[in-house]
Image (tube, helix red, strand yellow):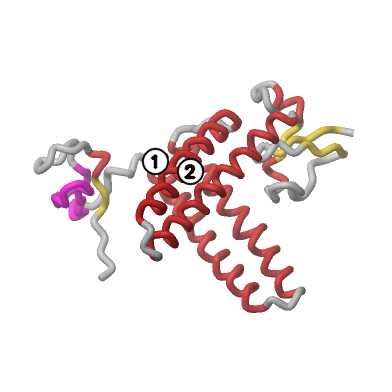
Amino acid sequence: MNRYVCTVCGYVHTGDSAPGQCPVCKAPASKFKPVAEVERDHKYAGTQTGRNLMDAFSGESQARNKYCFFAEAARNEGYEQIAALFEQTAMQERQHAKMWYAEFHGIGSTAENLVTAAEGEHMEWAGMYARMAREAREEGFHALAERFARVADVEQGHEERYLRLLENIRKNRVFSEESEETVWMCRQCGYLHTGPEAPERCPACGYAQSFFERKAENY
């Protein structure tokens, strides 16, 4: 019997092969690696401490979102001070979540992060929401099943967007295009530049090339 670890949440499976899906975080089989292989480069793999780190990340992330929701409710009721304190606490919880995520996973380059993000979105629409929609229908919650299915469509779009952005990085197309007519807009001041590449620095406000994007209008 072999041992396989989920590289998303740290769950360890014992068997002849990796499971089709992680029973803890629902990650696909592709996210499993042999424990011996992962232990060579991940000190928390297969440990309770590793699982605790991801539990802490999950708890802090959920708390941060809840406090943002609570701040909005407090502001709607006229309690500005309470809203501000909810928001302050939410930012602190965000920092806690970042600490634990970075300790367990590390935070990679933008290209690496886009791969991770695309994999996560794929797992959500192809696995998690598909399963949730099916189970909701089986239990008679048809309206909720439809909402799960519609959000799955959104997550699929997110995956496709991340993959396009990754392709731009790999082909060095983030700030360049073949077309001489491409219009680039400075996100800081709105300056427009036409040409195959964004300028290295905005001639209007002086901000770096990283603040330029292709100008797109849908209105």
How far across and down, in percent of the image, does residue 132 sit?
68, 64
Magenta span: chief secondary structure:
loop
Q: Residue at x 58, y 32 (%)?
A: 105
Q: Report which residue position mark 1 lands on.
A: 169
Quadrant housing residue 127: bottom right
Q: Which residue type does callout 1 highlight?
A: Ile
Residue count near mark 1 (Cα–Cα under 10 Å), binned few <14, some 14–19, many ≥20 = some
Q: Which residue type does callout 2 highlight?
A: Leu
For residue 114, the mark is 2
Residue furthest out toward the right: 1
Q: Residue at x 40, y 65 (%)?
A: 77
70 shown above or below 108: below
Q: Is residue 136 magenta?
A: no
For residue 116, the mark is none
Q: Residue at x 73, y 47 (%)?
A: 24
How far across and down, in percent of the image, does residue 104 sit?
60, 31
The residue range painted magenta reads 180-198
151 shown above or below 169: below
Of 136 and 18, the residue lying toward us: 136
- Going by the image, does 158 lie left or right of 197? right
148 shown above or below 179: below
Instruction: Tell me the SS state at disc 2.
Output: helix
- Going by the image, does 208 lie left or right of 102? left
Comparing labels 1 and 2, the label whose residue is closer to the camera: 2
Of 207 and 90, the residue lying toward us: 90
Instruction: Tell me the SS state at disc 1.
Output: helix
